[in-house]
Image: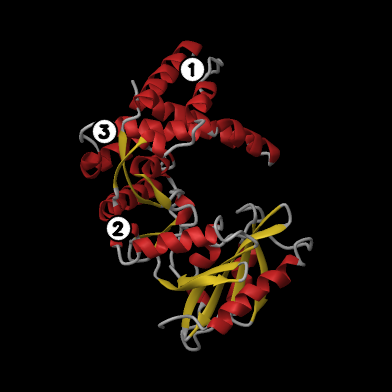
Amino acid sequence: MNGVPEAMLLAGAAAVRRVERTVAADIPVTSSRYLHAQRALWRTDTGQLDTDRLADVLARARPGDAEGEVELELLSAVVRLGKFSRGQTIKVRSYLALDDQPVSLKVWRGFDERTSPGRRERLVRAQIAGIDGYRSPRVLADGRIDDIDYLAETVIYGRHPSGPAERLNAAADVGTALCDGYRATMTGLRRLSATTHPAFRDRIDAALGPEPNRDWTPETLARLRDRVLRLIDQDRRLPVAVTHGDLVATNIIRSPDGRHHLVDWEHGRTGPVAFDLVKLILTSGDPARLLDALSATTRGFAGRRRCYSWEEQLALGIAQFLSWSEAGRRSAAAVGRLHRYEAEHRARLRLLVMLLP
């Protein structure tokens, strides 16, 4: 397949408009992971979707498994999954069969061209095309029509890593491969101040304030705050390259041959390598073991003149997460996920203590 017919892309984009009118309907919630895991959904004799099998898979999906992902409609050989925010469509992903091959079509509608996550993903995917270390599905076609961004790519069959051992193994494999990708797209070194928000320092000062909790004393938090603020004030350099931006287990798919693939690049950008990998380390389930597993391949990202050490770069990556803590806590509380957010916040502080003993 050399590309996706424009008529099909237009039809997919038009479906977004139709779907918007069904938002208020009683639609069952499911997750795209059930489609990734079911190669049998595609009939090899016809190249079409097996609708009976699909119905069975969706029936076994647990409501609420993936908050915000909604199975919208089934039209011929097309399955559409959508994400919504305050009743407005953000993104629709379609799985369809073209030229006897299944294709994933992502559609974003209603964004300004300059700020569209669809445009960002299209630009990043063009930068990493053909670079094996990024483990990205092959892009078949992409573009923008009116206020609609679209990207068609090959479907990756497999499943997300689950359980501590699988998550750690996937993180080690993806992290090692990504380091090769980073080296291929590295644009040099940038000062910290050129890669972070102007309010970064002030936010950290507040986020690591002397508020006592069951895990850390005010003295421990004060020491961490002082260490991080000193690092920020030094304004040294970090290596930057094309980064994924959201390295979590649900964006990793393990295919039957054991290879791990990275999907959903809409948060990608050129940024600090350490800031990208630190999220993978945090969500691996065993940060200490993953740091050890990646130590050989990450060694080259530090040791240069006026450059932060690798541990300091990772610590600053965690600090960036912490600088968003106030907004993150409000958002989590609004959707009833404050308990989970607090657990993630404690995990970040534990890793920060490990990196800056």
Q: Quadrant of the N terminus?
A: bottom left
Find residue 216 and name its label.
Answer: 1
**Mark 3 = which residue?**
307
* The C terminus - image quarter: top left
| For residue 213, side relative to residue 260 (left or right) | right
Calculate the distance from the C-alpha at mark 3 to the C-alpha at mark 2: 24 Å
Q: Residue 281 at what x, y percent from top left?
A: 38, 40
- For the residue pair 70 and 324, the one nearer the viewer reads as 324
Nearest the camera: 110 or 22? 110
Q: How many neighbours does mark 3 have within 10 angstroms: few (below 14), some (14-19), or many (20 or more)? A: many
What residue is drawn where x is 34% and y is 44%? 273
The image position of residue 173, as x and y in percent, is 31, 52
Query: What residue is rendered at 65% in x and 53% in y?
Result: 64
N-terminal of the two: label 3 or label 2? 2
Query: Which is nearer the N-term, disc 3 or disc 1?
Result: 1
Q: Residues within 10 Å of mark 1 (few under 14, many from 20)?
A: some
Q: Position of residue 235 (x, y in %)?
A: 35, 29
| Element marked by disc 1 | loop
Residue mark closest to the camera, 3 vs 1: 3
The amino acid type found where label 2 is placed reads: Gly
Q: Which is nearer the eye, 198 or 218?
A: 198
The kind of residue on which mark 3 rests is Cys
Measuring from the top left, give residue 196's x and y in whole percent. Answer: 44, 37
